[in-house]
Image: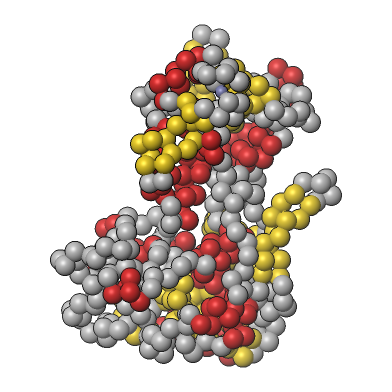
Amino acid sequence: MLSKEFPGGILVLTGANSATGLRSMPARYIFLDEVDAYPASADEEGDPVTLAEARTTTFSHRRKVFMVSTPTIRGLSRIEREFEASDKRRYFVPCPHCGAMQWLQFDRLRWDKGRPDTAAYHCEGCEKPIAEHHKTQMLERGEWRATAVSADPHSIGFHISALYSPLGWKSWQQIAREWLAAQGSEEMLRVARNTLLGETWVESGDAPEWQRLAERREAYGGTQVPVGGLFLTAGVDVQKDRIEVDVWAWGRGLESWLVDHIVIAGGPDDPACWDKLTALLGRTWACANGAVMLIGKLAIDTGYEAPAVYAWARKQGFDQVAPIKGLEGFNRATPVSGPTFVDATIGGKRLRRGARLWSVATATFKTETYRFLRLERPSDEDRALGVLDAPGTVHLPDWIDTEWLKQLVAEQLVTVRNKRGYAHPEWQKMRERNEALDARVYARAAAWIMGADRWDEATWRRLEAQAGVETRLAPPVTTTEPAPPTQPKAGTPTTPRRKRRAYTPNFMRD
Ligand SMILES: [Zn+2]
């Protein structure tokens, strides 16, 4: 199924996650599809694009490598990096009125306020509106033109957006409509930018101010799991003299609540310290309805004292515990990879491949966390009308102190130039202590490892049933119209069916 012979050659298909497949044979032509969706590493053997490209070396100047992709996030996007290094060809089309050759740009698509049906393209030469029906002829008379000189004359790049969609695919009106529909949601705007315009999304790296977070702290009952929290993860930061544990509850759309903050004094050398951490694995947190929850997955950093962490994790079992290693850099298509098997030393005995280790691209989750922290909250008025918090909203309890808040916003995304002059985004500490941010990133990684980013509706409903939470409906599209009277109030807990029963959802098992 994965190879087709034809007169003059053979076509071999392989996955970007398979190092063996990518290494299998020399190839003169390589077509890499959707490169922005590739994992950072194929079977831990390195960048899949580099692995694939190495197949062509024996063909030297007769080889061809063709990469195609919808772009994703600025700084993470492979295709954007490739395009930037190319001669950046754009498709130039003539204006039907004045003949000026131009490439189509989104800001020249204009419509009357709130009237996407009036959308027309405005010529950059004569400023006259161009109607949709001219498009077919414009495309026929167009041509690719380079807009830059590439450092490597053999590298050519092409960019095309939905503005060029032929008749019957996607009209300019439709693009205007989809763009309007995406307003107000950062996530939908990102998708629109990526898929309609073929442009990368620029993540904002400004840390929210801790004072603003302090004002937003909420009273949700001590260390109780709030309504809407459907499972718990813990992020554990190991320091020389203490172990810090943050327990987060997660709900639909990765809405999250800080549920507990525990500092265990002592360090990785102190057995009592590990015993206290072990005890947390059996501890339960109460839900509003009387049910109790265990930590679904605890992610622990191996950066400071890896052997001690491996030994402890092996003893607990990898169902509930995930040792993790933070990876620097933004150039990763998947935020978590692994697990890989690493050696562990138990009681002085070395066990080959005795422990598991997950690699976490911390930059990705830091960016996400700050984006989530910046989300607008519904006003009390909107709330009364049934408007829910946006997916991703981060809730902080009233008992958390300002030092913790300052740690959470301790970093900033800055643009750094390397020795060769290439600019890339990088997270940098603005103050010495940042454990709260690290622990949050680990807890988020734990949610990813559990699969929360890929669960289907049935899984969320099962979790809601287990937590005794009514299914939360999507927020109404507008915030000005009252919700229909039949809509249940957001997140209203139902009568608990069972009381005081600790549960670990069965899909947590690996
Ligand atoms: Zn014109």
Q: Residue at x 57, y 18 (%)?
A: 98
Indicate whether 156 appears above or below 423: above
Quarter holding residue 100: top right
User: Looking at the image, which is closer to me, 171 or 32?
Assistant: 171
Q: Is residue 376 visible?
A: yes
User: Looking at the image, which is closer to me, 130 or 490?
Assistant: 130
Q: How far from the left and from the top, in percent, is residue 11? A: 52, 21
Q: Residue at x 80, y 51 (%)?
A: 418
Q: Quadrant of the C terminus?
A: bottom left
Q: Quadrant of ligand 1?
A: top right
Indicate whether 464 appears above or below 74: below
Quarter holding residue 107: top right
Q: How far from the left and from the top, in percent, is residue 371? A: 53, 63
User: Looking at the image, which is closer to me, 160 or 359?
Assistant: 160
Horizontal arrangement in the rendering, residue 460 relative to residue 184 (left or right): left
Q: Quadrant of the N terminus?
A: top left
Q: Is residue 300 visible?
A: no
Q: Residue at x 56, y 48 (%)?
A: 201
Horizontal arrangement in the rendering, residue 119 relative to residue 338 (left or right): left
Which residue occupies the extreme left position in the image? 486
Q: Residue at x 32, y 59 (%)?
A: 478
Which residue occupies the extreme right position in the image? 419
Marker count (numbered): 0
User: Looking at the image, which is closer to me, 78 or 372?
Assistant: 372
Q: How far from the left and from the top, in percent, is residue 114? A: 38, 46
Quarter holding residue 353: bottom right
Q: How is the image coloured?
A: secondary structure
Horizontal arrangement in the rendering, residue 175 relative to residue 444 (left or right): left
Q: How far from the left and from the top, in percent, is residue 135? A: 45, 21
